[in-house]
Structure formats: structure tokens, C-alpha cells
Amino acid sequence: MAPRIVTLTLNPAVDLAWEAENVHPTDKIRTRSEHYDPGGGGLNVARVVRTLGGESLAVLLSGGVTGQFLQELLEEAGQPVRNIPIGGRTRLSVAVHDRADNNEYRFVAEGPEITEAEWQSALHAVEIADADWVVASGSLPRGAPEDTYRRLAVATARRGRHLVLDSSGPALSAALGSGVTLIKPSLNEFEALVGHALPDRRDQATAAAALVHAGASEMIVVSLGADGALLVTRAGAWHLAAPPVAVHSTVGAGDSFVAAMTLALARGEAAEDAFAWGVAAGTSAVMHYGTARPDRAEVERLHATLIQGVRQIPLSV
């Protein structure tokens, strides 16, 4: 039986993705190849888990006419959900791919303000869900306290579950040391977390190792963009280069990484192998337009190659 993963999305969105021949000011810009996807970190993770053969339940907050649109998209995708209705309207997010310069322009709305009763209901829904792995991904909406993910981490650890956290800033900092299994910041987010620049890969690995050994998180993955990603556990540090591919959309690529790595860990695979699954899914995602749309067969092919490229990094301590 496929492992079940429950995800939490407190600030979801309806993701709109379009192509334009040339993005420039003032004039009306015609678009094509429109994609409409359920968006927000946890929702992306839940969808990709199912794409890769796992089972997932997505817990989310949504409201208003945009929330109804989001629910329609989730139903079309066949995604099991536990929706907590809110008084505000779910946000919209827009990504435009400029074919003239091959750049992607992303516009992400702030989203609604939620009440204490709403975010408390979402945490409770995750706590009572039947799953050994929990993924909390994305920004906190206005109205949610900075320690929301810490509360979730404590509740998850108390029930003997694993929490994967993909967030940044105060929300991430507050949760560290509370029983988190895996965090996945970008390099910029990780440098902000430790408080200084980390230009050298060994310095990056050493800083992550210090956090792991201090009990901040059992595993840390630092995404390095075109340079791949870095994995650090108590057993050591590893780097995996990203294969060169044509990039069509980066929206949801990190969530695809989290989904694949979490699913592999839930299946009992070693951290380094799960890491390669993550890079494979993130790579496949950027090769397709829309939000978090990796192809399963493509991910499997990429993984078979990437697993050979995982390299251990010596630490400075």
C-alpha cells in the first residue's frame, strides 16, 4: 500500500500561467497557452505525491469565489482534500513566460487575513489525519502567528510523526528544534537563517551540519538553483548537480522536490536516494509549463541517472 502523506496549505492560491510573445509596459499584451492550477506549497506537494504514485490528503484554508474556483480545480485533479472555509477570498498568483527573452515574471498576491479559529481548525485537521508524514509548505497568511509551524511541529512529534517544513523567515526559525524531520530552504533563505553569507559549498554544508547536530532539524536540504542541491544529515553532507535542461516554468519546482523526497523517505529509502528523487522531480517540473507538473516516467528516468552523481562533501568541522 502506498504511504499516505498529509499536507498543510494555510495560504493557497489559484495559479494562472500564461505565455506572451513580448512583455512590455503600457500596450495590451496578448497571452496564450493558459494554465490554471491549484497553487500553494502544500497543495503542490500533495498533487505531485499522487503523480508519483503515493497517496495524499491536502488540508487547506480557502474562501470566496476564488476559493470555489480552487476547489473546482482540486476536484478535477482528483485530489483528496480537507477544506477549512474562511471568511476571506483565496488569492490569485500569476506567472507570465516572456518568449522574447525567455524570462518568467511572477506576481504573487498577499492573500486574505485569517482568524485564530480558522488556523486552529487547520492545525487540528492535520493532527487528526491518518498519516505518518506531514508536509507544511508555503507562507503564513496574515493573522497566523509566527510560531504556527512550531505548534504543528510539537503536535506532530507528540504523535510520533515526521514533519517536513518548507518555509522561510520567522515562521521557519520559530519551528527549529521542535521535532522537525526535514527543512528545505533556498540558499538565500538559509543564509538569512544563519545570519551571514555562505559563498562556499563547504561553508554551506558546515553551517547546515551545525544546525543538524544542534537538533534544529534531522535533515536539511539547501536548494542551490542551477547548481543543484545540498543534503546534510548527522551521517554527512552530499551535493547533487542539477542536469542541464530547458526551463519552461520554475513555479512549484521546489514543491515537486519536497513531494518526491518525502515520498521516498516515507517508503523507507535512504536519505541520499530520497535526495536524488527530489532533484529528479524538481528537474522534471521546470521542463513543463504550469505549476508543479513533473512527469512520472521522466522523473524515474532522471533518478536512474542522478543517483550516480550524488557526491559526499567533506565538512570543515
Image (cartoon, grey):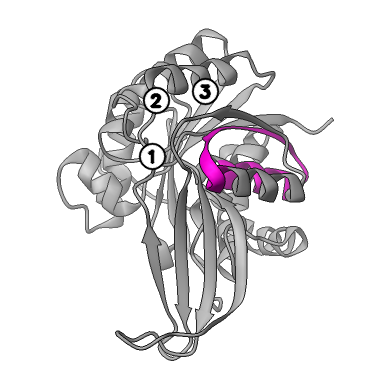
In the image, taking residue 33 as reference, residue 312 lies left or right, namely: left
Q: Quadrant of the N terminus?
A: top right
Q: Is residue 285 above or below residue 8?
A: below
- The picture quadrant where one finds residue 166 is top left
State the residue position of label 1: 112
Q: Residues at badges 1 and 3 in contact (C-beta under 8 Å)?
A: no
Give the x, y percent position of residue 78.
77, 44
Residue at image x 54%, y 48%? Answer: 66
Q: Which SS class for mark 3?
A: helix
- The picture quadrant where one finds residue 149 is top left
State the residue position of label 3: 122
State the residue position of label 2: 149
Residue at image x 44%, y 55%? Answer: 229
Q: Please give the range of residues in magenta.
A: 43-67
Give the x, y percent position of residue 286.
55, 67
Residue at image x 60%, y 72%? Answer: 34
In this view of the protein, which residue sits in the foreground, 39 or 41? 39
Amino acid type, label 3: Ala
Amino acid type, label 2: Tyr
Q: For the residues marked 1 and 2, what is the alpha-carbon distance in whole angstroms?
A: 18 Å
Count of all numbered marks drawn on residues in the image: 3
- The picture quadrant where one finds residue 152 is top left
In this view of the protein, which residue sits in the foreground, 273 or 284? 284
Residue at image x 77%, y 62%? Answer: 297
Q: Is residue 64 magenta?
A: yes
Question: Which is more N-terminal, label 3 or label 1?
Answer: 1
